[in-house]
Image (spheres, coloured by chain):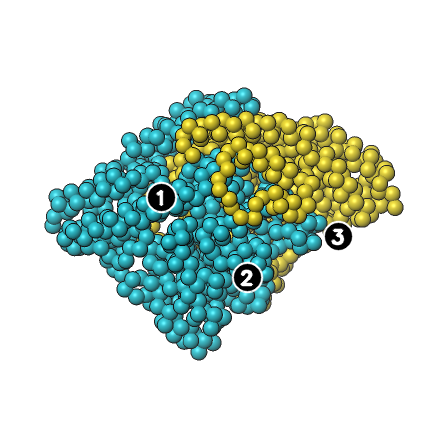
Chain colours: A yellow, B cyan
Amino acid sequence: MDAAEFRTQGHRLIEWIIDYHDTLDTLPVQSRVAPGDIAALLPEHPGDPDGFDALIADLDRVVVPGLTNWQHPRFFAWFPANTSYPAILAELVSAGLGVQGMSWATSPAVTEVETRMMDWMIDLLGLPDTFRSTSESGGGVIQGSASEATLTSILAARHRATKGAVNVDSDTTKLVAYATSQAHSSIEKGLRIAGVGTANLRVVPHDESFTMRPDALAEMIEDDLRQSLLPFWVCATLGTTNSLAIDPVRAVAEVAKAHNLWLHVDAAMAGIATLCPEFRGLNDGLELADSYSTNPHKWMGVTFDCNLFYTADRVSLLGALSILPEYLRTAAAETGAVIDYRDWQVPLGRRFRALKLWFTLRTDGVAPAQAMIRDHVAWTQELAGWVAQDDRFEIVGPHPLNLLCLALRSGDEATATLIEQANATGRVLFTRTVLDGRTVLRFSIGARRTRHEDVRAAWNLLRELAGTAVRP
Amino acid sequence: MDAAEFRTQGHRLIEWIIDYHDTLDTLPVQSRVAPGDIAALLPEHPGDPDGFDALIADLDRVVVPGLTNWQHPRFFAWFPANTSYPAILAELVSAGLGVQGMSWATSPAVTEVETRMMDWMIDLLGLPDTFRSTSESGGGVIQGSASEATLTSILAARHRATKGAVNVDSDTTKLVAYATSQAHSSIEKGLRIAGVGTANLRVVPHDESFTMRPDALAEMIEDDLRQSLLPFWVCATLGTTNSLAIDPVRAVAEVAKAHNLWLHVDAAMAGIATLCPEFRGLNDGLELADSYSTNPHKWMGVTFDCNLFYTADRVSLLGALSILPEYLRTAAAETGAVIDYRDWQVPLGRRFRALKLWFTLRTDGVAPAQAMIRDHVAWTQELAGWVAQDDRFEIVGPHPLNLLCLALRSGDEATATLIEQANATGRVLFTRTVLDGRTVLRFSIGARRTRHEDVRAAWNLLRELAGTAVRP
């Protein structure tokens, strides 16, 4: 493909993307295909190139019917994964440049723009200065996902707890980690990967709000210490996946500090709320945390993948992950004057992801995200009012932000059926979860294109379905 | 940013990208900035949004001077990280759609196009059917980088060797892994992450071609078994980073099989050569491997990140990495009829990266990559002829593909100085490494835009510098 063809097809694809976004309303939220349907539309073996006209036709024929449309205004499932025009353009530029950011020397701008963006986000989110690149021992990095941030945090903590021995020959079986049953699955996965194992993940009891009980945490740590185990890491969550429950970070931090545990705060979803000053209460106690992560690729519209990972202890992080083979040695790195972000993450290679933040902040700024967050929270509270007036329904758990968990009083099966029936209409998409044994419908209001009328329509649909199909 | 603005700025950025590529020749290959120079051009704190004109101006003012230009025709450093127009457009579409591919249900097309592309690449690279999605126990997935593929392979192997106990409470300190000193740094890093530790990485001796000695491997494994250790994983490399050395996969596989070790074949750089049938000898023995990875984002031009990871034992892979919290349960997954790629990788979330392969194969096909690979290999051999005629220089190690390691006979310091002086001209970029204690200049011919005259010019520059500045 030459430059002229790139220009022609690039312009066509920009139109195609605009059309996709403008016609989302007419598409079912969830793909209606059955397993194998999409594969059946593609040749089993590669053929001769057939060009861009055929390719664009196949975007419509093959790809779009196979999409669950995360940008749809009535996408209320899982968590949002918003994309937005400035971030899309930044991805275009990043791919166009094709530079590597593994070391400072492999493209200094990739590293230095990223460091600046991480510091800017500290200002914008009201995070503590302990995470700033200019602080004594902290700093931040863009990771691909909160799962990777969690794993990175576990590895840094493991390094600190074993005084580095884990890199060489330490036994990992005495290490013990702590989180509630509401914490994200990436915690169990990360602990498995790190060789800690699930038997050494303690499930800390939660209260009726699904938030961690610091007193129970303290007891468990003391128990483990009595058994000569090595408590090393605790994860507090700001906004759990199940119900957006908010663990009491300050109280958890005090327990963690008292026993020298690494405190990781997973704010993947809810942390972005602190773009609005009125939600900064969420940040209480973060100055005591060893690491923190939140996802601009969820509620802020900075296209996946863009996770912000901060630590107050970069020495342990670097101890865990730094490598320096001969072929990666550079003069700049040896002076210690630069950051080599490859040592802040699991992979070696890295894309120029900071452009997504830079483009977003310089074109739209944070005002649109703030307005959206305020709307979503307000609409969730309004929705809760509607639900409270319908005695077939029950609200399960608190709903301080933009997620309401609700259930039919007639039981788990009815709730599960309601979700299936609602999703089958193609007009909405919800996901289910289980909260303390109870099946609930998660009504997550987080898509950028969601309007008040979409929330209303979705609720009307639930009421309608609850009135007919779900009768025993 | 509204659709009209997205259209306007998208068109501008497409021109900007074309200009960047068309003027690469006029830019220094390596960025000339000093640490902190780029950061100093950016405000310390975020200001009000200042719009796209300022942003595009800053791409030229701030970003481009801070780039080391990996797409430059005289980029001979590290390994290539080629981008190309079809893959850039695919990244645009992927960002535009903003869908998640963590599960089949989260967007079936993301999964099914990816599975097809992985099978297509088996055809195109001549890989064994043991890796095909339709095989009894194999399959493939796109990972972000070869580092992640290596880690994934270690985790699957660790799971198989401990019969799954490692996920729960197994001691990892008895596990032993094997590779040569020439293997990639991600192996040491992956073993550290997995809790195996560097003390349990055996450095298998290599011969004078820098390739693994299978007899030495067998002896080391037997030694470790005598000490009641648990040999579990061996990595053979097709194209080491230092010198593109090719480990003898079939002979290594026979040793691995005899002792029930997992054999991973890291072909990150050289595997793509097998797009050309005449290089398929590289694949000898791969039908005995448990896992394999190669990077279309290096020599094929499918913009980073695009690593192909194949395994012949998906059961162990899934055992190591699968998770199923309530909020990720879907009807489709429970039937077992679909693939949930989140269980094939470390992170949970995933981008629609298969589009990059699909766009590339349907527009350009493999012919341009084949022609490029053939040119690069031929030019490397021609370069070796030139070097052999200059008795100030010496070729170090074999050079069957597109990397020539060379040194000045006058010693390591002279070679290091030569590299620095050549790079300082801005007209070329080389990296150095150490081969068996000797400093060498790596002349890697892998950039898509490199022409024969660029190789000639780079060699002329080296000759010129060797004749003047490097005198003792």
Q: Find disc 1 in the rendering and name its residue.
A: B372
- At horizontal 31% and vertical 55% (from top left) the residue drawn is B400
Q: Is residue B462 above or below residue B241?
A: above
Q: Find disc 2 in the rendering and name its residue.
A: B313
- At horizontal 60% and vertical 29% (from top left) the residue drawn is A21
Question: Which image quarter is the N terminus of chain A in?
Answer: top left
Secondary structure of the residue carrying tag 1 is helix
The alpha-carbon separation of the residues under discs 1 and 2 comes to 34 Å
Q: Position of residue B167 (x, y in %)?
A: 58, 62
Query: Is there a contact, CB below 8 Å, between mark 3 and mark 2?
Result: no
Image-based side of B340 in relation to B454, left or right: right
- At horizontal 82% and vertical 37% (from top left) the residue drawn is A465
Query: Is there a contact, CB below 8 Å, between mark 3 and mark 1?
Result: no
| Chain at numbered mark 3 | A
Q: Position of residue A467 (x, y in %)?
A: 85, 37
Q: Find disc 3 in the rendering and name its residue.
A: A437
